[in-house]
Image (tube, rainbow, N blue to C red):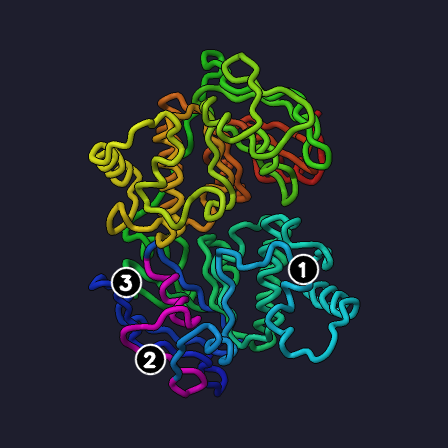
Amino acid sequence: MNETAVNVSPFLEMRNISKSYSGVTVLKNVNLKIYPGEVLTLVGENGAGKSTLIKILSGVIQPNDGEIIINGKKVEFHSPLDAEKSEIVTVYQELNLFPHLSVTENLFFTTFHKKKGRINWGELHKEAKRFLDEFGVNLQVESPVSRLSIAEKQMLEIAKGLYSKARLLILDEPTAVLGGEDVDRLLSIVKELQKRGVAVIFISHRLNEIFGLANKYVVLKDGDQVANGKIADTDTDDLVSKMVGRHVSIAPTTQVDYGRNELTLKVEGLSRVGALHDINFSLHKGEVLGFAGLRGAGRTELVRAIFGADPIDSGKVMINGSEVKINSPRKAINNGIGLVPEERGKQGLFKNLSCKQNMFMANTKLKVIKHNKEEIVAEGYVDSLKIKLAHLGILVGSLSGGNQQKIVLAKWLESGIGILLLDEPTRGVDVGAKAQIYEVVRDLCEQGMSVILISSELPEILENCHRVIVMQKGAITGELTREEATEEAIMKYAVGGIKK
């Protein structure tokens, strides 16, 4: 949209927004303006202040200074309900669904109070199906949300925002857990909303999405607004340099000589009814083995089975040549296996505990707590992983997504594992933190660690993996060497082509 071409007023203005906690400034004089039908992208490294700004606009927290203007009138939001009354809806990166309620119940949860008399569930299910079909979201509306994949949960969360008929929709990392067709579908939904005059604030670390979708950008760094402008007037290198203040590059992983490197993990005939079908592969010392595939391919189910988080019906897992029986995460840890899960907030961290406590949570050999020694070790991880935090005693749930992920990595480094399973490790992580995470992975492999990497972003797979295994519907459909691996080859096997 060209705002100078039509006589239209902005839907939202934020003027000189500032926020401090205990004397520490997290936002300073931030300004933005968005018109109906525009997509504004808010970019910056994790910890730059994006989440704080969104929480202010959503009524979760209040600014210390500044004004919010809606349709030319100053407003004050003291709760999320105030923001919703102004037709502002936020879809957060951390999902906010009721797992034991149905898709229909979750979709209509905030509108039930408007319905009088007895609820006609048959009609509601039909209405839910009709609405979801309109936006190309294919879900079983009567099923409980607990049965959905994380990508399906994300699409439902977005659908809730759409159903509320918002005039401003804030999408915080909406594609972080999506891949392939799901991303395309979501981006087409946003474009349709633009046509309907809905303003969208879009937060993403995937720069190709930003350049394909947004009209304008605002860059935050350490709470300051360092740049803003039209997307058409910038490019990838320029925007990244504004975000991180330096040139960022991810060096490709060096090749591994498999003739010398011994096997650390071997999986034979691993199966579970309805999820995994005769999985066979091996992992070498110092190797990064990538697993690619579309949503529902079975990659997450596989690493959870290896980690003992989910049961298996048949098959063998061998570590260093010996078969092991892993039927719980504790046994996996005792056998030197660690898992960075897809849902780090729910499965990888104790958000109500401190950063230091989380770092030592997986060390099963720690018998006596020596606080002084722990402090020194924890500070070492903060320095080596470049974790941004005020102090070690701060609750891990208060950190940005990228810094939370680094705490998960520190936890496994402290546990002394030899095999690390990474399930979407850079989901919701900015470009600078991504580079740091993969630098750590490369260093670990050079020291002899073996890594399985799952990522829905094919450039990450191609840049960081020595071999790539492709899955589809719970089965392996292809294995590619580093030289053979291309996006086209991976996608061929991801949709069902089987390597001869």
Q: Which mark is residue 67?
A: 2
Residue 58 painted magenta: yes
Whether label 3 touches label 1, CB < 8 Å: no
Q: Tell me the SS state at disc 2.
A: strand
Q: Quadrant of residue 78?
A: bottom left
Residue type at mark 1 is: Val
| Residue 141 rendering spot, x and y as whole percentages | 72, 59
| Residue 242 rendering spot, x and y as whole percentages | 32, 57
Which residue is labeled 3 in the image?
A: 26
Whether label 3 touches label 2, CB < 8 Å: no
* Residue extent of the magenta highlight: 48-74
Q: Is residue 19 positioned above or below 372 on the image?
A: below
| Residue 178 rendering spot, x and y as whole percentages | 57, 50
| Residue 14 rendering spot, x and y as whole percentages | 36, 76
The residue depicted at 41 percent of the width and 45 percent of the height is: 350
Q: Real-space Cα distance between discs 2 and 1?
A: 37 Å
The residue depicted at 50 percent of the width and 26 percent of the height is: 332
Q: Is residue 306 left or right of residue 235?
A: right
Q: Real-space Cα distance between discs 3 and 1?
A: 37 Å
The tag earlier along the polypeptide, 2 or 1, is: 2
The residue depicted at 51 percent of the width and 71 percent of the height is: 89
The tag earlier along the polypeptide, 3 or 2, is: 3
Q: Tell me the SS state at disc 1.
A: helix
Residue type at mark 3 is: Val
How would you rate the neighbour count of disc 1 (Cα within 10 Å): few for under 14, some for 14-19, many for 20 or more? many
Whether label 2 touches label 1, CB < 8 Å: no
Q: Tell me the SS state at disc 3.
A: strand
Which residue is labeled 1 in the image?
A: 103
Q: Is residue 174 left or right of residue 393?
A: right
